[in-house]
Amino acid sequence: MTVTVLDNIGQLVTNDAEVGGSGEAALGIRSNAALAFENGSIVWIGDAGAVPEGLGDERIDAGGASVIPGFVDSHNHLAFAGDRATEFSARMAGESYSAGGIRSTVAATRAASDEFLEAHAHRLAAEALRSGVTTIESKSGYGLTVSDELRSLRALSSVTSERTFLGAHVVPAEYADRPDDYVSLVAGAMLDACAPESKWIDVFCDRGAFDGDQTREILTAGVARGLLPRLHAGQLEYGPGIQIAVEFDAASADHVTHATDEDVDALASSTTVATLLPGAEFSTRAVYPNARRLIDAGATVALACDCNPGSSFTTSMPFCIAVAVRDMRMTPAEALWSATAGGAAALRRSDVGALRVGMAADLVLLDAPSYIHLAYRPGVPLVRTVWQAGVRNAVLAH
C-alpha cells in the first residue's frame, strides 16, 4: 500500500489525549510537524523534516498551513425530500418556529422515490465532506410509516454507518387524535422493521412532539432491540428530555437550548454529551444554548450541523464553529474540539476525531496558518484538501 507523508505542517491539531488540559491545551497542537498514513490509518507523527528514511511513497508539502482532524458531525437529517424555503422566509419576517413544519417534509418524503432519497442524501453528505466533515450521522424521521422509515434508513445505508432511527420525530397527521397508537406503532412494528438498519434510536422529546412517558417507552423498546440511545432534548422549552437522556446513559442529548441547573449538573456528572446545534438557532432566531455554562460545569460538548430542511439547512461545520464562537461564547479552541473530538464522543467513537498513530487518516488541510481562522474568517472556504480514511477528496462520508 502507498504511504503518504504530509510534511511541512505549520500547525498540526491532534486532539491528543496524552497532552490533556482544557482550552487550547486540549488540542494537542504540534508546530512544524509532519505525519504519514497508510491503508486508511495514521502510521507516524513527528517533526517536519524528520520523516524516517524510506518512509513515504508520496510526499505532500503543506506549505506551512494548518492541519486539523476531520470534523465529526453527529446530528443530521439527510433522508428527506422537499423544500421549506418559504417557511424560512416567513420566520425571517417574524413568524415563530414550531415543530409542526416537519409534517410538510413528511408528505414530500413519502412521495419521493427510493432513488431520489438515496441520491439526495449522498449529495448532502458530499457537500458536508467538502467542508471537512469526514464522519457523519444521519437520522430517519420524515417517513413516519413502517415502510417509509425503513426505506429512509436503507437510503442512508450507502452514506453512513451512523444511522439513527427517528420514527418518534413527531406524531404524523393521521395519528393526530390518537398519539398513543402511534407510540405503540413506533415501539412495535416500526422498530421491528427498522432496528436491523439502525445503530441508534432517537426521540424528539419536546413541545409538539413526545412527552417524557412516551419517550421512555420508545427508548426502552429500542434498547431492547439492541439500539443505542440518543435524544433530542430541550430545543423548544424546558422539559424532561435531558434527564431522560442521562437516565438511559444516552450517548448524546442534542440541542440543550433550555436546560435547568439540575440538567447541567446531570450532564456534567454523566457520559452523555451535550450536542449543540447553532445552525438551528441561527435559522430560527431562537436563543442560543449556553455553551459557556455547560463547559464550565464540566459537561462534554459537541457541535453538529443538524442539517435538515426546516430549521438548519446547512452542512458547513466551519459555519457552525464561527457561530458558536461569536454567539455561544465558545473559544475557537473549544469550538474546534467540540466539532471533532466532541462529535466523536457523541458517537462513542475512538477511531475518529483526533490524529494519533493507529487512528483513521481523516484530516483536513486548511488554507490558513491556524485553526483560529475557521472563526476569524467566517464564510471563507478555507478547506483546501480533505482526506477521509486516507482517501484524498473522497466522495462519501463514513
Image (spheres, rainbow, N blue to C red):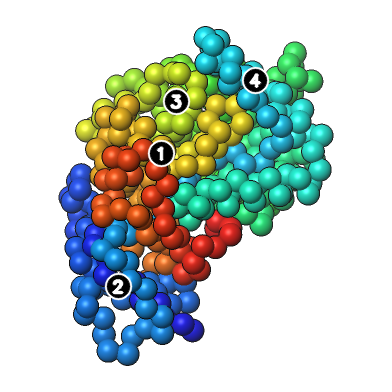
Of the numbered discs 1 and 3, the one sitting upstream in the chain is 3
Report the Cα–Cα distance between label 1 and label 3.
14 Å
Of the numbered discs 2 and 1, the one sitting upstream in the chain is 2
Report the Cα–Cα distance between label 3 and label 4.
16 Å
Q: Of the residues shown, which amino acid type is indicated by label 2?
A: Asp
Report the Cα–Cα distance between label 2 and label 4.
48 Å
Residues packed near mark 4 inside 10 Å, few (<14), some (14 to 19) or many (20 plus):
few
Give the image quarter of residue 4: bottom left
Identity of the residue drawn at 64% across and 51% down = 122
Of the numbered discs 2 and 4, the one sitting upstream in the chain is 2
Residue pointed to by mark 4: 86
**Position above or below: 61 against 174:** below
Residues packed near mark 3 inside 10 Å, few (<14), some (14 to 19) or many (20 plus):
some
Mark 3 vs mark 4, foreground winner is 4
Quarter containing the C terminus:
bottom right
Identity of the residue drawn at 50% across and 68% down = 391
Residue pointed to by mark 3: 282
* Element at label 2: strand
Residue pointed to by mark 1: 379
Of the numbered discs 3 and 4, the one sitting upstream in the chain is 4
Residue pointed to by mark 2: 7
